[in-house]
Image (cartoon, grey):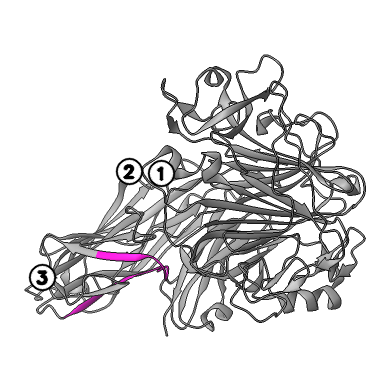
Amino acid sequence: MIKCLPIVFLCCSIQMVTGQITTPVIKANFGIEADLSSNYFNGTTQLTGDDWFSIGYTGSGQFVIDTTGAAAILAAYISNPATRNKSFSRLMRQAPYTVVNNKLLLDAVFHRDYHGDDSTVFASGSNKNGMTPAMWSCPVSQGIPDKNDILDTYTHVRRDGPNATDSLWMFGGLSLENTTGSRYFDFELYQTDIVYNRSTSSFQGYGPDAGHTSWKFDAAGNIISPGDIIFTAEFSSSSLTLVEARIWVNRTATSIAPVTFKWAGDFDGDGSGATYGYANILPKTAGTFYSGIQSNAATWAGSFALVRVDNSVVNTYLARQFMEFSVNLTKLGIEPASFSNNACGSPFRRVLIKSRASTSFTAELKDFVAPYRMFDYPKVDAYASTIYYCGSMPSATIEVFNPIGTSLYNWTTTNGNIVGPANGTSINVNAAGTYYVTQQLHSQCPTFAKDSVTILYDAVCKVLNVQVTDFTVDADGVEGAIRWNANNNEGAASYMVEFSTDNKIFKNVKTVPASNQPGSATYNLQTALENTGTVTFYRIKIIEKNGAVKYSNTVVIRNSITATSAPFIFPNPAKDEVWLSLVSPTKTSLNIFVNDIAGRYIKTVKVNVNQGANLISLHQLALQPAGVYIINIAGNNATATQKLMLKK
């Protein structure tokens, strides 16, 4: 059973009480009743209603969080208890802009936080809302009170209808270790890609206005550009007592009457004289804009169970352990349609969830969930497996490398020829030219991204293209051996070895005349190497007999072992084998996390890395089915994210 919760909206300068929805409700077909299962509402099963997960009740209601790998995670909790303190995230199981039960789903994230002693907490002291994140301090490891220890968090955004202009709703959920006394937390929404750097225990990527992005208005109160948002909530041992909406502004902006909302009176920055701070806001028109509730009895903890602070794994949340809320961003006047002509714009980019010590907005901050990204949709990336033809021009295919099933792709060309339909994830062409593709997230959205592919054609194939393969540079102090193989060597006039310190401006090291050997030829050059910085880039400039100029791939020489090459996976697209290349300053290990293009977790591959240059076979990746994958590489000395296409 769920307890009905009275909400009192408080503000300093305006004496008012605004009644809010505190009984279990369904908003935009999503249940707000402090329960996690679809087709289940307020203690009873039903045939409709979306939610975070599904326990298996029959009905049309859908769950929004991807549960791929849940069984393996739960099994590891038993077989390897050390995994219980690992943090992980899961994204929305549906593609963005999927219509489910006549509602437009935009994004969702579930995040399991570290618990107990960890570094994603605020150091004891005066870390507060209103400060720049640059000033927040975080320890290497520190415990926090149970009532502030965040266990799981949930965020979901959808439209209350199938259209891009229907009301925009945000849903949030959070569980804490302690269930007694008052609990205070914030959902802070950033416009920038703020991140937490665990190695330096600091935040990076925050906004330019005292560590945030400020909302800006013209003299008439129209929103010129959006900024950061924070929703702060307070739960007592028996009820939700406060939910407040604030936006980051220059103090002078509070003298302007906004068109889409109104000021509620409070302004809190870093001290009483702060130029920038969070000002609380209310809807322009009367009526509720949020609802909130907490579990009044034990309730199912979802597909990933729950790991408590004592490392026990349980299947239920305790009474008052799980809290849930909804906010109508359209009603509040801060959705994209409120400040632009693009209702498909992102209302924010990152979510930072924090707990506080007391009811004061500027109370000491305690625990946090490292900022996670939302609305990070893949932008169209087009490619053709062959872009150069000679002699004859056959029908060729150009494809979208990273298609989203719900996006619309349209192709055009001004100097080529498209054979057949000019929309979809691929086209057929039969002429040289440049082909453009645009991506729409929804039929009612403007262009989201665009890309192009150029097909080249040469009617004469008398001189074959010269290709350099197996290009290596072996350094031995100031001397080095430069080697390369050249295919179709008879087409080359000379080879120029070039170097660069910035991979942009190259200078000639030595010119090597082409040999008379036809077909494949091997070249060896012993020469002094340039050593002007931590890295030097080498390439081969090929001068063909017909005057054409081509370049080889670039080889990077590390002049200092402290320089680390970013991990790189190749070939791409791949078929039978996949390789990882990197240079590491130490002997270490890397975790390679494999997700599909929608962000769903597939598997984790662990590899050992030696000091210096490494070339490691990732045969496990090549065994995956054909498709596009997102590869996240994480280690102490190297991190990278890369798209990989597998073709079978």
Q: Residue at x 54, y 47 (%)?
A: 349
To which residue does mark 2 refer?
A: 505
Residue 488 position (above or below residue 325): below
Camera-side mark, 1 or 3: 3
Hey, what amino acid is under mark 3?
A: Asp
Query: Going 40% across and 73% down the picture, which residue do you hit?
Result: 573
**Secondary element at image label 1:** loop
Name, please, the residue furthest toward the left. Answer: 459
* CA distance separating discs 2 and 1: 7 Å
Q: Name the residue rendered at 74%, 54% in the picture.
A: 23
Q: Is residue 424 left or right of residue 569?
A: left
Within 10 Å of the Cα at label 2, are there few (<14), some (14-19), or many (20+) other Cα atoms?
A: few
Foreground of the two, 345 or 88: 345
Across and down, in percent, residue 425 comes to: 32, 72
As drawn, the label of residue 458 is 3
Specify the quadrant of the image occupied by residue 202. Answer: top right
- Residue 187 horizontal/vertical position (percent): 68, 44
Say which of 495 and 151 sits in front: 151
What's the magenta region? 395-410
Position of residue 390 in the picture relative to residue 167 (left or right): left
Measured as percent of width and height from the top left, residue 84 is found at 82, 66
- Answer few, some or many: residues within 10 Å of disc 1's Cα (few below 14, many 20 plus, some between 14 and 19): few
